[in-house]
Amino acid sequence: MSKENYNVIGVMSGTSLDGVDLAAICLKIENAKWSFEITDSETISYSDAWLSRLKNAVEFDNLELIKLNRDYTILLGSIIKDFIEKHGLKPDAVCSHGHTVLHQPQHGFTLQIGNLPELADLVAQKVVCDFRVQDVRFGGQGAPLVPIGDRLLFSGYDYCLNLGGFSNVSFEKDLARIAFDISPVNTVLNFYANRLGLPYDDKGSIAASGKIHGEMLSALNALDFYRKPFPKSLGFEFVRESIFPLIEKFDTTVPDVLCTFIEHAAMQTALALPGQSGKMLVTGGGAYNDFLIGRIKHHLPKMEIVIPDSKILEYKEALIFGLLGVLKLRNEINVLSSVTGATRDHSSGVIYG
């Protein structure tokens, strides 16, 4: 499938559990340069029952995971089909990430549910999906995958920072694209906001009312992950096994936890960058957290931080998985070994329908 213009639907569900992001995208290649337009976009929130299942999936046994995968594929198919009908779309393909429930590349394993072949039948479209498994099989982290899109679509920035369930960054170094996960962000912030009966801490106002807990901050910054060289990636297992037990050792308030964890995330962001100046694009739900952005600016005073319009801010990952799908259809490289640590660059994903 080699042509110059593609109309695709990018579908993404992140670890922050905000919902399913869908973006109808026009991608165009001209003189070896890609451009894009997001024409329609929507986020479909999860029901309370689905939130509970997805939050607890890390504890499921194999049979429970098989059922979860089937059920989630049906849910995802319904959501995508409704989106296509609502906007009158005729896509060349649906390019779907699925939802990560297990990510253990050190054990040669990663699982994104919603990538079963039945998805193509449910949406009555060609589907490109399951982008991470092949990379792990090639010895890579299976993550992050977005940096190929940063290189091809957002080359005007020195750094691309995403603040989602976890933060990750990508940049060019010695003619290679480098990228890695930095730290947990919304997986932790939303968990503690939930304790107050809130889905999230709006603009970081609760965190801003708290105080930094010095001992907790030091303990967080001392975690082994932050001393590891890239490539490296994070999954919810890290939060469950390392972050939550550490925080719970301290008897403090939710505002103080939020304040302390934001300071931790901001400090780790600054430490992760090889240069402390330049132009950095910031996307993901964390870009709406004014207190977090303020602390990042505090630790990177010479960095020009650019927060784009809401479509790019909220749907950049869906956009880039649309691009990954198109690259797969063209049989072109869509995963960079310099990013994931795989044995080679490759064209990842499976095509159904």
Image: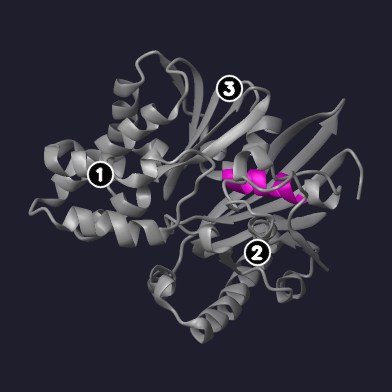
* Quarter of the image with the C terminus in it: bottom right
Asked if residue 60 is among those painted magenta in the image, a careful observer would answer no
What is the CA distance from the residue labelled 2 to the residue labelled 1?
39 Å
The location of residue 186, given as percent across then percent down, is 36, 49
Residue where numbered disc 2 is placed: 80
Residue where numbered disc 1 is placed: 220
Image position of 180 with respect to 243: above or below: above
In the image, the segment drawn in magenta is 317-325
What is the CA distance from the residue labelled 1 to the residue labelled 3?
30 Å
Asked if residue 324 is among those painted magenta in the image, a careful observer would answer yes
The amino acid beneath tag 3 is: Tyr
Q: If you read the primary sequence from the N terminus, does the residue marked by circle 1 or circle 3 appear first?
A: 3
Residue where numbered disc 3 is placed: 157
Q: Secondary structure at mark 1?
A: helix
Q: If you read the primary sequence from the N terminus, does the residue marked by circle 2 or circle 3 appear first?
A: 2
Q: Nearer the viewer, residue 203 or 333?
A: 333
Task: Report if residue 40 is visible in the image.
Answer: no
What residue is shown at x 20% (from left), y 40% (from top)?
217
